[in-house]
Every structure is written in C-alpha cells, then in structure tokens.
Amino acid sequence: MTSPKLKKMMEIITLCLDEKKIPFAVIGAMALGSYGLPRFTADIDIMAEGGFRENIREILQKTGFSCFQMSKNFAQFDSEMGVYGKIDCMFVRTEAGKNIIRRKITVSDSLMGNFPVICPEDYIVLKLLAIANNPERSAGDTADIVSVLRAFREKELPEIFPAINPDSLRKYAAQFGQELLMRNLWNDVFASSFPKRNFFL
C-alpha cells in the first residue's frame, strides 16, 4: 500500500522541479514500482544534473526539507520531524548520466500521480555502477537486475518503456568492470549468449 505522505512528497518534488525546469528522474524503489515490480519504500530517490545541485537544495529547503548531507555526487534531505520522509538525490555530470535523464519516461500511476522515471535499461546501468562502487551491496543490486531482466523476458514491463538492449548493457558493464557479472546474469535469465566484446583497430 502506498503511503499518503509518499504521494504528497512526490507531488511536491515534481511540481517544484518542473516549475523551475530542472531535469530529473525517479530512480530506486519507486522506479521498480513503475516497472510493475513493487517494493515498499518510505523514501524517494531521484537523479538530477549536477549543475542544478544548489537550485535543488534551495527549492527543497523552501518546501520544508533540510539537507543533512551533501557531496559532489549525492545529497540527502529530510522533512521537518520526518513528516514527509526523506529524499535522496544523485547528481550526474557526464553526458552518459545526463542522457539517462533525457531518456526518462513520464508515468501515470493511479496511486502516485504523474512523475518522470528512468528506463529499465538505465536502471540496470545504475545498479551495475552501484556494484562497481560498493561491492558489499552487490547481492541486493544483483537481485534487482535479475528481477528487471525477468520482467523483460516475460514481456511484463509496461509498453511505454523501450526494450532493453543487451549491446548497450555490455558497453556500460565493460566500462564499470562488470562485464562478466552482466554476461552471467543475462545468460542465467535468458539461457542465451550475452553479446561478446568486439575489438577493432
């Protein structure tokens, strides 16, 4: 069951950031839910361009959130006395990261309203990056990747999302040093060969 305060928090984020024309997309557990793979969450995770970091902090503070942790790549916000919950924000600066936001799809959820969410393929890319950055959390991230791949295999992902491209996944997996993991996961789910890397002069 979706928490009313989570819905309110999502409405606040979407309204405020859209009003200021700040590109962002939902990631994390809420993204999984939009793929038809619901998971309980009390927080909202978003991705935004790093150039808007201070704008986002200012906007959220004006709407009643306090920033209790901020770095170059991440920020965490909490509402006063935890009324609305927490918002985790990931900031991207590379073109690859910005392209993930540009590929976002606006979903219409009967419980959560309308909000932009990253595509399933990009969700897997972010999970591969998370595993590369923190191998200790790989079990949970690997399980999430498998659940998305299985939904894709069974054609259970909503049609508004583009198909997952294994060649694109291979490229990112190789970039993050996770090509073997991605190949094994793909082969386990599809019982077919994951694309191999080609070398050119």
Image (cartoon, rainbow, N blue to C red):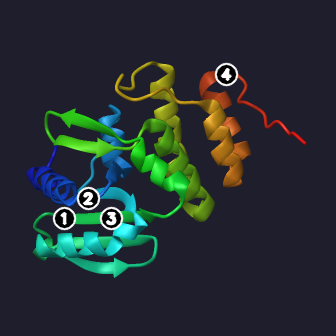
Q: Amino acid at mark 3?
A: Asp
Can you identify the residue that label 4 sits on? 191
Q: Are marks 3 and 1 in contact (CB under 8 Å)?
A: no
Secondary element at image label 4: loop
Query: In the figure, residue 135 lies in which quadrant?
Result: bottom right
Which residue corresponds to the image point at 28% horizontal and 59% vertical from the top-left?
22
Q: Are marks 4 and 3 in contact (CB under 8 Å)?
A: no
- Which mark's residue is nearer the viewer, 3 or 1? 3
Query: Upstream in the sequence, badge 4 or badge 3?
Result: 3
Query: In the figure, residue 132 lies in which quadrant?
Result: bottom right
Query: Upstream in the sequence, badge 1 or badge 4?
Result: 1
Question: What separation in Å lies between label 3 and label 1 (alpha carbons)?
Answer: 10 Å
Across and down, in percent, residue 6 comes to 16, 53
Question: What separation in Å lies between label 2 and label 3 (alpha carbons)?
Answer: 8 Å
Can you identify the residue that label 2 sits on? 43
Can you identify the residue that label 1 sits on? 85
Query: Upstream in the sequence, badge 2 or badge 4?
Result: 2
Can you identify the residue that label 3 sits on? 88
Which residue corresponds to the image point at 16% horizontal and 57% vertical from the top-left?
19
Q: Quadrant of the C terminus?
A: top right
